[in-house]
Image (cartoon, grey):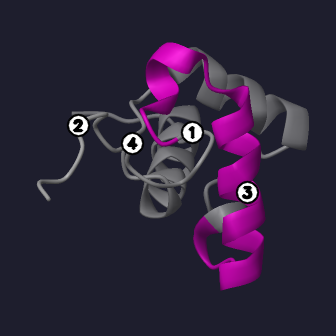
Amino acid sequence: MCVCESDLIKMKLHLITRRYYPGIKYNEAALGQVADDLGIRFEREIRDLDTDRQADLAATVLNALPESAAGPSRTTGKKKRSGSAAPA
């Protein structure tokens, strides 16, 4: 099986983002667009980023994802609670 550099970049972007936002779904178009926008041409450019830069990158990717791929925790970072009241 052969994997091209652009696929490696998209997968790495997805894995970094999923670490910070676990509910996201893989969206090839959005990941490719982020890589193009940021000028990322080689996976090694993002391989060893420090934690702060990874968090910034993850936020950038999350903002580029369509709602359908962003998952339920896009706005709050937490799972939404159900509307039922706790028993008294």
In front: label 2 or label 1:
2
Of callouts 3 and 4, which one flags the residue occurring earlier in the amino acid sequence?
3
Q: Quadrant of residue 1?
A: top left
Checking the image for residue 84, the label placed there is 2
Quadrant placement of the C terminus: bottom left
Q: Is residue 24 magenta?
A: no
Can residue 86 be seen in the rendering of this structure? yes
Of callouts 3 and 2, which one flags the residue occurring earlier in the amino acid sequence?
3
| Residue plotted at (39% across, 42% down) | 80
Of callouts 2 and 1, which one flags the residue occurring earlier in the amino acid sequence?
1
| Residue plotted at (43% across, 32% down) | 71
Spatial CA distance of label 1 from label 3 is 15 Å
* Image coordinates for residue 50, horizontal then vertical, percent: 69, 84
| Residue plotted at (60% across, 17% down) | 66
Dot 4 falls on a residue whose secondary structure is loop
* Residue type, numbered disc 2: Ser
* Residue type, numbered disc 4: Lys
Residue indicated by mark 3 = 57
Residue indicated by mark 4 = 80
Q: Quadrant of residue 46?
A: bottom right
Spatial CA distance of label 2 from label 1 is 22 Å
Circles 3 and 4, Cβ within 8 Å, touching? The answer is no
Circles 1 and 3, Cβ within 8 Å, touching? The answer is no
